[in-house]
Image: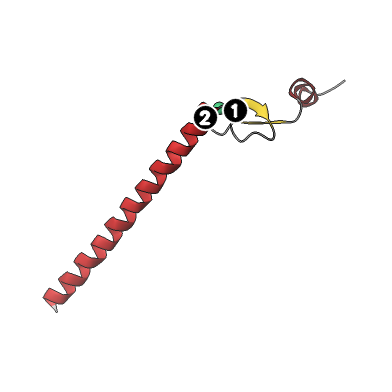
């Protein structure tokens, strides 16, 4: 008797799942399709943009605080 895990292994062979859509795919692929790769790259770009905005915001806050201290002091 084989477990369901063995059966899946037999059916699919060594595989992993696409990080974007979760489809099964060969283990040496990073993504299941070009579309998912594009998707991933786009979301990475967005993340970078977002973190840059956060840094600008933090620096801006610090500058405001310094100016306030300077004015109040
Ligand atoms: Zn995919």
Q: Quadrant of the C terminus?
A: bottom left
What kind of colouring is applied to the model shown? secondary structure
**Residue at mark 1: C-beta within 8 A of ligand 1:** yes
- Real-space CA distance between mark 1 and mark 2, rounded to the nearest whole angstrom: 7 Å
- The residue at the point 47 percent across, 32 percent down is 39
Q: Quadrant of residue 18?
A: top right
Residue at the far right: name it. Answer: 1
Judged from the image, the secondary structure of the residue bearing numbered disc 2 is helix
- Residue 31 location (% of width, % of height): 58, 32
Please give the residue where the numbered disc 1 appears in the rendered image: 32
Q: Taking the image as drawn, is residue 21 in sight?
A: no
Please give the residue where the numbered disc 2 appears in the rendered image: 36
Q: Is 28 on the left or on the right of 33, as rendered?
A: right
- The residue at the point 43 percent across, 38 percent down is 43
- The residue at the point 50 percent across, 27 percent down is 35
- Residue 5 location (% of width, % of height): 76, 26
Q: Quadrant of residue 66?
A: bottom left
- The residue at the point 45 percent across, 42 percent down is 44
**Residue at mark 2: C-beta within 8 A of ligand 1:** yes
Between 64 and 28, the one nearer to me in the picture: 28
> Is residue 40 placed above or below 11 in the rendered structure?
below
Between 7 and 26, the one nearer to me in the picture: 26
């Amino acid at each position: 008797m084989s477990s369901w895990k063995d059966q899946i292994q037999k059916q699919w062979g060594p595989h992993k799942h696409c990080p974007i859509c979760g489809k099964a795919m060969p283990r040496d692929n990073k993504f299941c399709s070009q579309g998912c790769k594009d998707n991933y790259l786009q979301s990475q770009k967005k993340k970078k943009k977002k973190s840059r905005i956060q840094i600008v915001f933090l620096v801006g806050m610090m500058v405001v605080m310094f100016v306030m201290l300077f004015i109040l002091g």
